[in-house]
């Protein structure tokens, strides 16, 4: 009976791992194929290690010069290198993370430690707005950004992403401060520090893991955000650029797969390495 | 004003500090959201005059037009269908994964680490991952079934009848990950002594699950159900990227419908009106959320 139990557990663990990892297997396979191999019925389940798609995606260049020559209306399609886009994504992700920390951490601290009028009202209204579907914000933001000439700017997209990150980040950080003993600041206050000093030197230092989880959460949100990037910019960050590979005339699936593999490396690595902080932040805030 | 146990003497100075801490975030979020939200309500009450580039107030005309169009009830049904299926699937799989990964087995901590991966993958990539599984041209699902001799020719999975479920499965892959992470965290916090006591009482596995494990994980699980429902109701990325609302109007949920009307057909007022109706659905889910969890949030 116990043995059967153990076997069942392992069977289910294998199924669970398949559910989580199998989609990546096929994406990786496609990234090594050319269009001819992709169209085979049935395909090769273990493709040869052909890095041409990665080279094209990283360095740019003409598609199809080696394997499948495709001629479109304008001739051979030039593929853009994904590196400048990656750089944009990193820059915007970092600015979003930085600004989220700068705005959400003080607010989260104040919500955790201060009593004031409109505390609940302002806290809940911040969430109420986050409850609006992104599509509802896109339409007015698009018209507003257009009149402010902020379409297709780093600043515009960064600000748009901040709407998505701030409320939840505030919540995460508030929860973190709540878990810290009040005696920390009180001791500093008694020693004659001003409240600002107490916050800056004592609380912020003690809550560095909280800051890290806020920053990570913000970076990951910005990295993957699609709708704002699609509508408010002209393919500034990775998600809309990925879309442009498959929606272009030649539907470069194999190059797309290579670009997609490259684009998930940073978030997957960050999330796996720092998952302790992420999970602590997420569970803490949601359990509150 | 009280801070901690110390009552600060200089009220004005603290008030200033408070302002510095809190205003930037709150003002930013409210400014960037409330103004646009009001603006979109206004837009939905207008006809856009492209010649002069100005919205012209026309009252409820856009809403009447949408409610009368045959697409709207279809779209509403598709949205609900998708949302219900996604919510059920992701919440059940998520809970299942959490319960499974709470068992003892070799390599547990390593395998648990995998849970965070689907969550970290951007929607664009998850959409393509699953599109490449279901594709009728190069889908691995077709390839496997073909190789095994179950089908004679490739099947169109993203068809009129099945596409919405395919997208729902894909969405659930992503959502079940966060559900599992949160539920697993709750499961791990169950004190060992409870299980020991149950073992002494000679409780069966089922009894332990019913009386200890499930009640312990239920609050956080119901929270994730609501979160998943909310994500599903307002989902744009996954559906747009996998099927763009097609084939035909088979996966045209309200957010996609709104996007199509506004950005592709350039019917500004109607697009805004659909977006407003769509956010009503999200609002209903959110209200349920606060109704259930209002007391749990201590701020």
Image (spheres, rainbow, N blue to C red):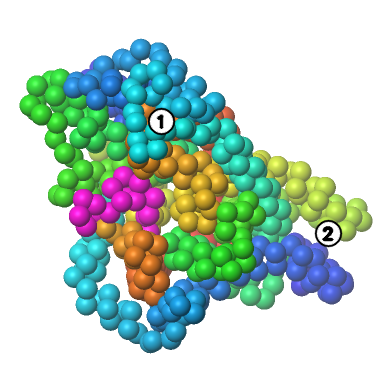
Left or right: residue A120 versus residue B282 is: right
Q: Kindly give the residue lying farthest to the right in the view shown.
A: A192
Q: Which residues are magenta?
A: B234-251
Question: Where residue A153 sits in the image (x, y, percent)?
Answer: 62, 53
Q: Which mark is residue A76?
A: 1
**SS for tag 1?**
loop
Name the image quarter holding residue B50: bottom left
Q: Which residue is at 27% across, 75% downward?
A: B66
**Circles 2 and 1: CB atoms closer than 8 Å:** no
User: Is residue B287 within the magenta segment?
Assistant: no
Question: Where residue B288 sits in the image (x, y, percent)?
Answer: 37, 66
- Crowding around mark 2 (Cα neighbors within 10 Å: few <14, some 14 to 19, many 20+) is some
**SS for tag 2?**
helix
Q: Residue A70 or B266: which is nearer the viewer?
A: A70
In the depicted structure, whether residue B11 falls above or below residue B79:
below
Of helix, strand and loop, which mostly describes the magenta segment? loop
In the depicted structure, whether residue B18 falls above or below residue B132:
below
What is the chain identity of the residue bearing mark 1?
A: A
Question: Where residue A116 sits in the image (x, y, percent)?
Answer: 69, 72
Q: Which residue is at 63% across, 51% downward?
A: A154
Tell me the CA gap for discs 2 and 1. 65 Å
Closer to the chain start, of discs 2 and 1, is 1
Q: Kindly give the residue lying farthest to the top in the view shown.
A: A48
Q: Which residue is at 16% across, 39% downward?
A: B156
Q: Which residue is at 46% across, 45% downward?
A: A240
- Crowding around mark 1 (Cα neighbors within 10 Å: few <14, some 14 to 19, many 20+) is some
Please give the residue where the numbered disc 2 appears in the rendered image. A195
Q: Nearer the viewer, mark 2 or mark 1?
A: 1
Quadrant location of the N terminus of chain A? top left
Q: Kindly give the residue lying farthest to the front in the view shown.
A: A74
What is the chain identity of the residue bearing mark 2?
A: A
User: Is residue B250 within the magenta segment?
Assistant: yes
């Amino acid at each position: 009976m116990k043995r059967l139990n153990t076997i069942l557990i392992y069977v289910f663990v294998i199924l669970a791992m398949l559910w989580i990892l199998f989609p990546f297997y096929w994406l990786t396979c496609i990234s090594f194929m050319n269009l001819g191999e992709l169209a085979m019925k049935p395909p090769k389940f273990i493709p040869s290690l052909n890095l041409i798609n990665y080279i094209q995606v990283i360095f740019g260049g003409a598609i199809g010069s080696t394997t499948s020559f495709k001629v479109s209306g304008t001739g051979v399609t030039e593929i853009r290198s994904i590196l400048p886009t990656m750089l944009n994504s990193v820059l915007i992700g970092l600015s979003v993370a930085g600004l989220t920390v700068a705005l959400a951490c003080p607010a989260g601290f104040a919500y955790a430690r201060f009593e004031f009028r409109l505390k609940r009202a302002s806290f809940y209204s911040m969430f109420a707005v986050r409850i609006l579907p992104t599509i509802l914000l896109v339409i007015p933001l698009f018209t507003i950004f257009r009149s402010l000439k902020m379409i297709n700017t780093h600043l515009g997209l960064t600000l748009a992403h901040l709407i998505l990150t701030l409320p939840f980040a505030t919540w995460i950080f508030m929860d973190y401060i709540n878990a810290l003993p009040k005696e920390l600041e009180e001791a500093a206050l008694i020693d004659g520090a001003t409240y600002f000093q107490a916050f800056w030197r004592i609380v912020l230092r003690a809550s560095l893991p909280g800051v890290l989880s806020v920053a990570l959460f913000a970076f990951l949100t910005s990295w993957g955000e699609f709708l704002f990037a699609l509508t408010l910019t002209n393919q500034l960050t990775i998600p809309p650029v990925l879309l442009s590979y498959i929606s272009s005339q030649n539907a470069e699936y194999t190059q797309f797969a290579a670009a997609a593999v490259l684009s998930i490396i940073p978030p997957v690595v960050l999330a796996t390495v720092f998952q302790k902080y992420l999970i602590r932040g997420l569970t803490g805030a949601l359990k509150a | 004003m009280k801070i901690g146990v110390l009552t600060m003497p200089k009220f004005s100075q603290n008030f200033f500090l408070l302002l510095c801490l809190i205003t930037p975030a709150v003002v930013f979020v409210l400014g960037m959201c409330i103004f646009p939200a009001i603006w979109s309500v206004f837009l939905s009450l207008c006809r856009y005059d492209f010649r002069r580039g100005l919205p012209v107030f026309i009252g409820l005309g856009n809403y009447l037009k949408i409610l009368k169009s045959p697409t709207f009830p279809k779209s509403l049904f598709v949205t609900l269908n998708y949302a219900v299926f996604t919510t059920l699937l992701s919440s059940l799989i998520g809970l299942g994964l959490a319960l499974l990964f709470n068992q003892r087995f070799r390599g547990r901590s390593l395998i648990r680490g995998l849970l965070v991966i689907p969550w970290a993958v951007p929607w664009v990539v998850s959409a393509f991952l699953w599109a490449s599984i279901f594709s009728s041209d190069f889908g691995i699902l077709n390839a496997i079934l073909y190789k095994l001799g179950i089908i004679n020719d490739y099947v169109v999975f993203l068809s009129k009848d099945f596409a919405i479920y395919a997208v729902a499965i894909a969405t659930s892959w992503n959502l079940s990950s966060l559900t599992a992470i949160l539920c697993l965290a709750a499961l791990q916090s169950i004190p060992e002594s409870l299980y020991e006591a149950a073992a002494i009482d000679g409780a069966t596995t089922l009894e332990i699950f019913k009386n200890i494990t499930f009640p312990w994980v239920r609050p956080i699980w119901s929270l994730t159900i609501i979160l998943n429902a909310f994500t599903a109701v307002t989902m744009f990325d996954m559906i747009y990227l996998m099927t763009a609302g097609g084939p035909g109007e088979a996966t045209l949920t309200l957010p996609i419908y709104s996007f199509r009307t506004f950005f592709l057909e350039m019917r500004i007022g109607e697009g805004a009106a659909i977006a407003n109706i769509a956010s009503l659905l999200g609002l209903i889910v959110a209200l349920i959320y606060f109704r259930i969890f209002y007391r749990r949030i201590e701020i």
